[in-house]
Image (cartoon, rainbow, N blue to C red):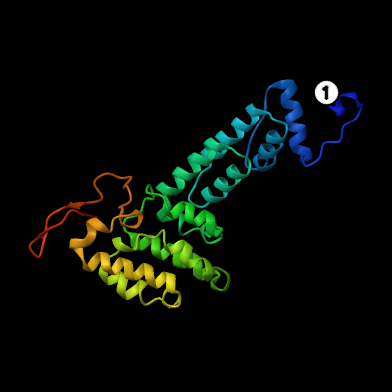
Amino acid sequence: ELAESRQTEVAIHDIDELAMDLLIDFCYTSHIVVEEANVQTLLPAACLLQLAEIQDICCEFLKRQLDPSNCLGIRAFADTHSCRELLRIADKFTQHNFQEVMESEEFLLLPAGQLVDIIASDELNVRTEEQVFNAVMAWVKYNAAERRQHLPQVLQHVRLPLLSPKFLVGTVGSDLLVRSDESCRDLVDEAKNYLLLPQERPLMQGPRTRPRKPTRRGEVLFAVGGWCSGDAIASVEK
């Protein structure tokens, strides 16, 4: 038995007053209006009071609001309040619309760990891996003084071996932040070896050499196997 059950008045903390009014009304009427102005206070209150029906209503509302400009914020909100289905949908939306998401302010404000979670996915929808590298460098250079320390951690999830040789040498290899870090230089060297030694590619397969899965059919062409300098190739190129 809870101590509060014997009290005539109970103080409830950390719940917005307006949200509490709406939840009390719902308990009596089974009716509630969720909108942009109240969803960010209603969902935490519903979670705290374990009102699963209101949680579901709020999550469904937020699913309908998903947009490249806000999906990362909704994803973080869902993660904070343990809304697993909303988190899954927001993740899928982010991956599918990454080319637009990477242009948003929310993307530039991501913590390093969340950035890694996004770009590590095989489901990331990009036309070329160059887009992923450019997005990562835009994120780092948004606050280079603080973020350059995270570059090795983040860059290892960019699939450098899948870049064009021209881009790898001319853009990645010449970037001052990349050149100034030994771990980053090692990643560039690994990619160069992969591109320069096609006969060795079967022995160099790993997460960074695996092509991402296209979400739109008909936009990506894969070359499987073949011959190079008289030797058979057992690799796949995008």
- Residue at 58 percent across and 44 percent down: it is 79
Q: Residues within 10 Å of mark 1 (few under 14, many from 20)?
A: few
- Quadrant assignment, res 134: bottom left
Q: Secondary structure at mark 1?
A: loop
Q: Which residue is farthest left?
A: 230
Read off the residue under disc 1. Answer: 1
Q: Position of residue 130 (x, y in %)?
A: 34, 63
- Residue at 25 percent across and 57 percent down: it is 203
Please, is residue 203 above or below residue 152 in the view? above
Image quadrant containing the C terminus: bottom left
Q: Position of residue 148 (x, y in %)?
A: 52, 71
Query: Which residue is at the front of the view, 108 or 19?
Result: 108
Looking at the image, residue 43 sits to the left or right of residue 142; the answer is right
Please, is residue 51 above or below residue 163 in the view? above
Query: Which residue is at the front of the view, 192 or 23?
Result: 192
Q: Position of residue 124 (x, y in %)?
A: 39, 50
Please, is residue 134 above or below residue 217 in the view? below
Looking at the image, residue 185 sits to the left or right of residue 238; the answer is right
- Residue at 58 percent across and 70 percent down: it is 146
Q: Position of residue 57 (x, y in %)?
A: 60, 31
Looking at the image, residue 238 sits to the left or right of residue 40; the answer is left
- Quadrant assignment, res 194: bottom left
Image quadrant containing the N terminus: top right
Q: Which residue is farthest right?
A: 8
Count of marks placed on residues: 1
Please, what is the three-letter code of the amino acid marked with disc 1? Glu
- Residue at 40 percent across and 47 percent down: it is 96
